[in-house]
Amino acid sequence: MIMQNLKCNVFFVLALIGLALFPYSFAQADEIPDTEGFSIARLVVAEAVEDHEPVRPGSTFSSKTMKVFCFLEARNIVERTPIVMLWSHEGKESARVDLVLKQGARWRTFSSKNIVGQRGAWRVEIMDTHRKSYGSLDFTVE
């Protein structure tokens, strides 16, 4: 009985620690495990990128917002890897931005899209050059 209570208490403490450490930042994807040669540590949409960091991240933006940025932080990049940030509005492709992740422990990059006045549902998807998806973010322009 004591051992059973101890196991329950340990599980409860670990669950609380997990909740306290869970990163949440508006429209930010959870870390995506290693794919084919890299992992995505952060994927965020934001109003700007300054000093290689996203500024004012969100999941909803005003229709007066001029641009939205998709920021990607990749880790453990095995080799130089071309990727695509595919921007879609209301389910239709709006822009395709080709980028490269350079080999190394960490690489940050971003693309932007002019969205002023384009209300509705948006999505940014990270893909390889063969259109295999590595992750995506949805956001809304109101």
Image (spheres, rainbow, N blue to C red):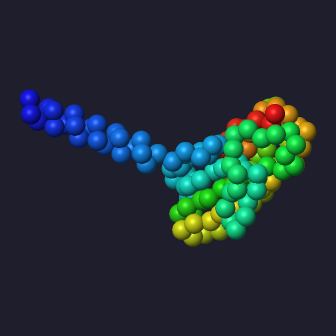
Whether 1 is drawn above or below 32: the answer is: above
Image position of 95 (left or right of 129): right
Work out whether residue 100 can be spotted. Answer: no
What residue is shown at x 69% (from left), y 40% (from top)? 59
Q: Is residue 14 left or right of residue 130?
A: left
Placement of the C terminus among the 4 image quadrants: top right
Residue farthest top in this picture: 1
Q: Is residue 17 visible?
A: yes
Q: Residue at x 14, y 32 (%)?
A: 4
In the rendering, at what x and y percent does residue 62 appear?
82, 40
Q: Which quarter of the picture shows residue 19?
A: top left
Q: Residue at left 55%, top 45%? A: 24
Q: Which residue is at the front of the view, 91 or 46?
A: 46
Residue 13 image offset from top left, x and y in percent? 29, 41
Give the quarter of the figure containing the N terminus. top left
**Count of labels in the image:** 0
User: Is 71 displayed left or right of 118 in the figure?
Assistant: left
Residue 41 is situated, as x and y percent measured from the top left of the image, at 56, 55
Displayed quadrant of residue 80: bottom right
List the single residue furthest toward the left.
1
Taking the spot 73% from the left edge, 60% from the top edge, the residue there is 49
Q: Furthest-right residue in view?
A: 117
